Image (spheres, rainbow, N blue to C red):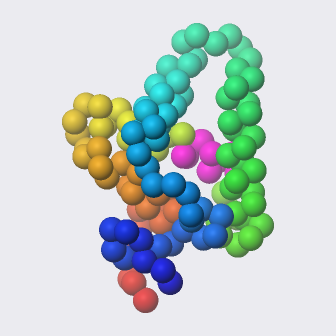
Amino acid sequence: MRGRPGGGPDRRGPGLRGGAPAGPADRAVRGLIAFLYSENQLFEGEEQNEGWARIDARLAALFRRGQESGEFRIDLSPAWLTEALYGLVASGAWAVAEGRVARNDFTHSIVELLLGGALRREES
């Protein structure tokens, strides 16, 4: 298995590898997504905003493709995985903004927690 830049194995499958590294634009986008996700219900009516519906559909499609290719577990629905990702991004961005966690650990920690879970496993 190919290693990731920080050391250790790269557990991301083909559908998740190869993206550009996180940079200033990525950090701005994740902060905006975190804000919108955590505050959007204050400004929306009863129906979901069309923009969120498109983002939800794209993320659910990503998770569905990952399930079909064997990269992601099938016991969690794409909708559940999408909501979990939103929750991690929103809470992580707020924790960074309040200085509780390191900004440089944001992307790595979210990827590891979403893909690897919180259970400690023995490396094989």
**Magenta stretch bounds:** 77-85
Residue at left offset 58%, top offset 10%: 43
Name the dominant secondary structure of the magenta segment: helix
**Left or right: 65 as drawn, with respect to 20:** right
Count of numbered labels shown in the rendering: 0
Dividing the picture into quadrants, the one containing residue 91 is top left
Vertical position of residue 20 compared to residue 97: above or below: below
Residue at left offset 50%, top offset 72%: 11
Q: Which of these two is toward me, 29 or 43?
A: 29
Vertical position of residue 111 compared to residue 47: above or below: below
Q: Where is residue 29 in the image (x, y as percent from the top left)?
A: 49, 34
Q: Can residue 90 be seen in this view?
A: no
Residue at left offset 74%, top offset 23%: 50
Q: Position of residue 36 (x, y in %)?
A: 52, 24
Q: Where is residue 14 in the image (x, y as percent from the top left)?
A: 64, 70
Vertical position of residue 6 compared to residue 38: above or below: below
Dividing the picture into quadrants, the one containing residue 66 is bottom right
- Residue extending farthest to the left is 99
Residue 81 magenta-drawn? yes
Dividing the picture into quadrants, the one containing residue 51 is top right
Residue at left offset 33%, top offset 74%: 7
Vertical position of residue 63 compared to residue 42: above or below: below
Q: Can residue 107 be seen in this view?
A: yes
| Quarter in which the C terminus is drawn | bottom left
- Residue extending farthest to the bottom is 124
